[in-house]
Image (cartoon, rainbow, N blue to C red):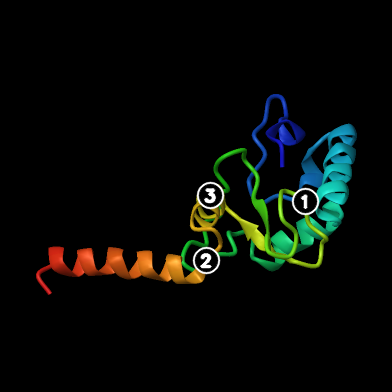
Amino acid sequence: MPAWLFQKTGQRRPSTAPITTLAPKSKVKNADNYLRRFYKISLAQRDALLESQGGRCANPGCRTDTPGGNKTFHLDHDHSCCPGDESCGKCIRGLLCHDCNVGSGLFDDDPVKLQGHADYLKAWADRKAGK
């Protein structure tokens, strides 16, 4: 979601606060229109999803409450269902922080590649620790 949707003068929006409570009405409307057009969900649904995740990244290995990047969590969807940047709305997996979203994309959303990389990093940590 573009950062300009959530810029606010004078006060920084807490990363876990619902957009609807802090942004001017025009920006709320723009954010809602953007989500409906590209992801087929409303801003209220996005805020409910973030709340259901405890205001944190959906990745269980991360769980940060700081979205990073453009200061908002990214909607993660199954690109094999909907190639490109748009979604049908039925394949939304959760909201990810910037780092997890980029990492997932760089590994082509492939769990085998991600697990292999995790094993590789663990093996290095074990060697470094003398195990």
Mark 2 secondary-structure assignment:
loop
- Residue 92 sits in quarter: bottom right
Residue 96 to residue 32: above or below: below
Q: Position of residue 64 (x, y in %)?
A: 52, 56
The front one of 100 and 43 is: 100
Q: Position of residue 121 (x, y in %)?
A: 29, 63
Q: Would residue 119 appear left or right of 108 to someone viewing this image?
A: left
Which numbered marker is on residue 110? 2
- Asked whether the residues under the numbered discs 2 and 1 touch, taking CB atoms below 8 Å apart as contact, a structural biologist would say no
Which tag, 1 or 3, sits closer to the chain's start?
1
Q: Amino acid at mark 3?
A: Val
- Find residue 82 and report its horizontal and vertical position in percent: 75, 59
* Apparent side of residue 107 relative to residue 84 in the rendered image (left or right): left
State the residue at coordinates (59%, 64%): 58
Quick one: SS at disc 1?
Answer: loop
Kindly identify the residue that appears in the image at 32 percent across and 70 percent down. 119
Q: Nearer the viewer, residue 131 or 51?
A: 131
Q: Which residue is mark 1?
A: 86
Q: Position of residue 84 (x, y in %)?
A: 71, 50
Query: Dot 3, how many residues are within 10 Å of its Cα: few (below 14), some (14-19), or many (20+)?
Result: some
Secondary structure at badge 3 equals helix
Q: Is residue 69 above or below residue 119?
A: above
Q: Is residue 24 above or below residue 101?
A: above
Q: Which mark is residue 36?
A: none
Inter-mark Cα distance, 1 to 3:
16 Å
Q: Looking at the picture, which amino acid does disc 2 mark?
A: Asp
Outermost residue to the left: 130
Mark 3 — residue? 102
10 Å crowding of disc 1: few (<14), some (14-19), many (20+): some
Assess whether mark 2 and mark 3 are in contact (beta carbons under 8 angstroms): no
